[in-house]
Image (tube, rainbow, N blue to C red):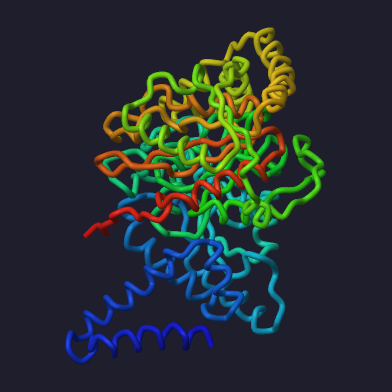
C-alpha cells in the first residue's frame, strides 16, 4: 500500500504539472527529488505518525534520507558510516511487521542516526579516531538497544571531534564537518555530525554525547534542538567514554516534541550502569505540552551573559521577552561557581586512553594527544578534591530552584565561527557548568545572524525536571518560527 502511495503521489504531481509529457524525464526525476525532500524534511513525530497510519512506509522514509545523504554528505561529512543496504533491509522487515499488526513501538520504521562514540553491535564505532578505525562492538549501547526496541532504524553513525575531546570541525579522521547553514563555518562539537545530519534532513533525529556541551553546542550552531538530560537519567553504558563523571547522552532533533519523544524511549534505569539513576518512567512527549503560565524564570546574568556577541545578545533578549509572556515571572539569580570540569575529565580521559597514548601516540591528532598527555602526571589531591566538590555542588545547586523553576541563558556567546578559525575560544563557557551540576538543559533555536547563522537559547531545569524544561521549550517554540527554517543546501557537483 505504502509503496503505491509514493508512486501515486509522484505520478499525480507529474501529471498535474505535465512533467513527463512536457518537460521530459529529467524534470520528472526532479519532481521525484522534491517529493523525497519533503518527506525527509518531516519531523520525527510526523514521520512516526505517517508510518503508523500506513500513509508512508519505513522503506520510503529510509530511501528519502539515503537520497539526501548521497547528495549532501559528500560536502557536510556528517556521517562516518552509512548502513544503506542494512538500513533498507531493516526497513523492509519493519514494514512486514507493521502489515502483520505487530509494531514495536513509537519509533517503528523511522530512520535515526547515532554519534560514532556510541556502540552499535556489528557496526564499527570509531570515535572518529584512527585508534578505533576498525573497532566493531559485539553489543549495542543501552540507548541503541532501546531505540531498536522502539522500532527505530539505524541509518548510520555520525562524525565527531576525535574521542569527543573538543569542538573543532576538522579534528576527525573522516572529513571536516561543515555547517549546513554555511559550509565554511563549524558545526560545533563534539557532536557536530549529529547536528549537521539533523539540520540537513539526512535523518529524523540523532543521538549525541555531552561532557561539556557537546549536544547543546552543535544544536545551537546548526539551528536544531538538543537536550542534555539530568546526569543518570539516560544510561551511558556502551559509550566510548571521555569522563565517567561528566558524560551524558541526549537526543538531537528538529523540534522539542521530537526530543521529548526520543527521551521517552532512551531514558530509564539500567542496572548494569553504575551511574544510572533509578527513576520512574515518564511520558515526556505528553508532558512537553503542559501549561507554563505558573513557571518562574531565573536569569543568571553574572555567569552567562558576559562578552556576548551583539546579535546573540539581541536574539536571546527577544527570546526572554517571549518566555516572559509565557510564564509567571522572571528575575535575576546567582549560581554557585562551578568547578572546572577539566579537573575531572582531564585525568579521567588520560586514564581511559593512557595505553594508546603510550603504545601508538602517532595515531591521535596532535591536539588530542596533547590534551591527553597534559594529565599524565595529574595531581591526585586536586582530582579527589574536585570529585568531592562536584558531589557537593550537585546538591547545592538544588537550592537555586527553591525560588525559580528554570534558568535561561544563551547557549553560545558568539555565532558559529569560520572553520578556518577553528572552534573558537571559550566555546563551553555557558555549557560546561551545567554538566558539572548534572542538570537537564535544552538548546532551542531563537534567531539568526544577519548572515543567516543560527543562534540558540538554553533552558535549564532542576535535577530530573525534564518535564518542566521540555514544557517551557515547547511553548517557546510554538510561539516562534525559528525552528521552521531550513538551511540553503547545495549538493556538491
Whether residue 353 can be seen here: no
Where does the N terminus fall, quadrant-wise?
bottom right
Between residue 294 and residue 75, name the one nearer to us: 294
Which of these two is toward me, 2 or 256?
256
Q: Position of residue 457 (x, y in %)?
A: 47, 37
Quarter where residue 274 is shown: top right
Q: Is residue 189 left or right of residue 111?
A: left
Is residue 420 in view?
yes
Up the image or down, 330 lies above or below 450; here it is above
Q: Give the x, y percent position of residue 288.
A: 63, 51
Q: Residue at (29%, 29%) from the top-left corner?
A: 421
Q: Answer above or below: position of 231 versus 398.
A: below
Residue 345 position, x and y percent, is 60, 24
In the image, is residue 491 above or below residue 364? below
Residue for point 67% across, 57% down:
286
Tell me the quarter of the picture where residue 54 sits. bottom right
**In the rendered image, which quarter contains the C terminus?**
bottom left
Count of labels shown? 0
Could you say where residue 460 lies in the image, as x and y percent from the top left?
A: 59, 34
Q: Residue at x 18, y 85 (%)?
A: 23
Amino acid at each position: 500500500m505504502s509503496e503505491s502511495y509514493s508512486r501515486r503521489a509522484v505520478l499525480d504531481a507529474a501529471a498535474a504539472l505535465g512533467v513527463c509529457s512536457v518537460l521530459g524525464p529529467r524534470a520528472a526525476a526532479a519532481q521525484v527529488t522534491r517529493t523525497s525532500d519533503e518527506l525527509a524534511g518531516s519531523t520525527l513525530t510526523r514521520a512516526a505518525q505517517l508510518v503508523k497510519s500506513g500513509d508512508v512506509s519505513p522503506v520510503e522514509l529510509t530511501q528519502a534520507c539515503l537520497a539526501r545523504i548521497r547528495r549532501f554528505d559528500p560536502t557536510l561529512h556528517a556521517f562516518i558510516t552509512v548502513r544503506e543496504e542494512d538500513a533498507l533491509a531493516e526497513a523492509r522487515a519493519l514494514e512486514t511487521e507493521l502489515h502483520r499488526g505487530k509494531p514495536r513501538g513509537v519509533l517503528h520504521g523511522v530512520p535515526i542516526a547515532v554519534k560514532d562514540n556510541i556502540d552499535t553491535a556489528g557496526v564499527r564505532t570509531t570515535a572518529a579516531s584512527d585508534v578505533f578505525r576498525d573497532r566493531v562492538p559485539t553489543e549495542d549501547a543501552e540507548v541503541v538497544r532501546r531505540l531498536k526496541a522502539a522500532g527505530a532504524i539505524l541509518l548510520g553513525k555520525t562524525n565527531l571531534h576525535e574521542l569527543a575531546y573538543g569542538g573543532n570541525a576538522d579534528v576527525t579522521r573522516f572529513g571536516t564537518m561543515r555547517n549546513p547553514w554555511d559550509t565554511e563555518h563549524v558545526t560545533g562539537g563534539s557532536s557536530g555530525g549529529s547536528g549537521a545530519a539533523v539540520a540537513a534532513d539526512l535523518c529524523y533525529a540523532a543521538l549525541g554525547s555531552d561532557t561539556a556541551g557537546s549536544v547543546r553546542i552543535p544544536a545551537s550552531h546548526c539551528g536544531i534542538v538538543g537536550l542534555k538530560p539530568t546526569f543518570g537519567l539516560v544510561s551511558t553504558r556502551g559509550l566510548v567514554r571521555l569522563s565517567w563523571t561528566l558524560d551524558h547522552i541526549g537526543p538531537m532533533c528538529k523540534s522539542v516534541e521530537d526530543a521529548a519523544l526520543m527521551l521517552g524511549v532512551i531514558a530509564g534505569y539500567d542496572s548494569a550502569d553504575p551511574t544510572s539513576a533509578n527513576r520512574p518512567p515518564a511520558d515526556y512527549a505528553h508532558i512537553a505540552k503542559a501549561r507554563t503560565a505558573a513557571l518562574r524564570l531565573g536569569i543568571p546574568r553574572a555567569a552567562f551573559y558576559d562578552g556576548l556577541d551583539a546579535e546573540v545578545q539581541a536574539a536571546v533578549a527577544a527570546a526572554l521577552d517571549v518566555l516572559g509572556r509565557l510564564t509567571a515571572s522572571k528575575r535575576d539569580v546567582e549560581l554557585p561557581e562551578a568547578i572546572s570540569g577539566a579537573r575531572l575529565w582531564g585525568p579521567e580521559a588520560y586514564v581511559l586512553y593512557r595505553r594508546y597514548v603510550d603504545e601508538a601516540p602517532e595515531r591521535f591528532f596532535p591536539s588530542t594527544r596533547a590534551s591527553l598527555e597534559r594529565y599524565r602526571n595529574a595531581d591526585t589531591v586536586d582530582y579527589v578534591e574536585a570529585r568531592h566538590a562536584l558531589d557537593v555542588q550537585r546538591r547545592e545547586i538544588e537550592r537555586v530552584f527553591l525560588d525559580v523553576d528554570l534558568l535561561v541563558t544563551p547557549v553560545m556567546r558568539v555565532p558559529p565561527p569560520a572553520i578556518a578559525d577553528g572552534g573558537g575560544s571559550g566555546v563551553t563557557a555557558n555549557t560546561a557548568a551545567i554538566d558539572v551540576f548534572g542538570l537537564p538543559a535544552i538548546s532551542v533555536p531563537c534567531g539568526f545572524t544577519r548572515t543567516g547563522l543560527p543562534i540558540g537559547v538554553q533552558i535549564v531545569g532542576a535535577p530530573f525536571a525534564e518535564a518542566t524544561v521540555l514544557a517551557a521549550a515547547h511553548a517557546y517554540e510554538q510561539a516562534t518560527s525559528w525552528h521552521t527554517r531550513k538551511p540553503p543546501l547545495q549538493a556538491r557537483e
